[in-house]
Amino acid sequence: MSLVKIKDKYQVTIPEDVREKIHCEVGELLSITLHGDEIVLKPMVVEEKYSEEEIDTLEKIFKSPHNRGRIMSADEFKKHQEKL
């Protein structure tokens, strides 16, 4: 068991041995829940909204020279997506 001190703005530092066990890094998200009088922190995995392939497809559509400067309809967008 590790002891931590509550600092300004109610912040606590996660001890190194605990960080190593849960493999957390700076900038990652943790969920926090209460179980009775216990505080439980769990690492969260945030899934990307779009896959790398979908992002590549979107970039190709938007960078296409004949599409610059105009707004595309949903149907046009779908046609471009199918071509790629």
Image (cartoon, rainbow, N blue to C red):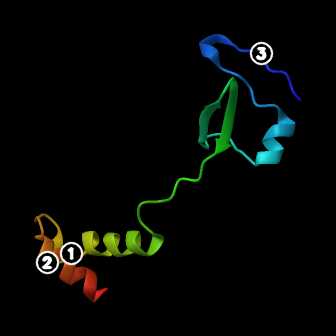
User: CA separation, marks 1 and 2?
Assistant: 15 Å
Disc nearer the start of the sequence (1/3): 3
Query: Could you classify mark 2 by the number of other residues whose Cα lies within 10 Å: few (under 14), some (14-19), or many (20 or more)?
Result: few
Query: Could you classify mark 3 by the number of other residues whose Cα lies within 10 Å: few (under 14), some (14-19), or many (20 or more)?
Result: few
Judge depth for marks 2 and 3 and give the one in front. 3
The tag on residue 20 is none
Disc nearer the start of the sequence (2/3): 3
Q: Are marks 1 and 3 in contact (CB under 8 Å)?
A: no
Report the residue at 82% width, 46% height from top: 21
Looking at the image, which is closer to me, 75 or 21?
21
User: CA separation, marks 1 and 3?
Assistant: 58 Å
Which residue is identified by label 2? 76
Helix or strand or loop: what does disc 2 sit on?
helix
- Residue 28 percent coordinates (x, y): 61, 44
Q: Residue flagged by tag 1: what amino acid is it?
A: Pro
- Horizontal placement of 42 versus 76: left or right? right
User: CA separation, marks 2 and 3?
Assistant: 58 Å
Helix or strand or loop: what does disc 1 sit on?
helix
- Horizontal placement of 43 versus 16: left or right? left
- Horizontal placement of 58 versus 11: left or right? left
Judge depth for marks 1 and 3 and give the one in front. 3
Looking at the image, which is closer to me, 80 or 78?
78
The tag on residue 65 is 1
Which residue is at the far front?
A: 36
Q: Residue flagged by tag 2: what amino acid is it?
A: Glu
- Residue 44 percent coordinates (x, y): 60, 48
Q: Dividing the picture into quarters, in which one does residue 20 lie?
A: top right
Helix or strand or loop: what does disc 3 sit on?
loop
Q: Are marks 1 and 2 in contact (CB under 8 Å)?
A: no
Which residue is identified by label 3? 5
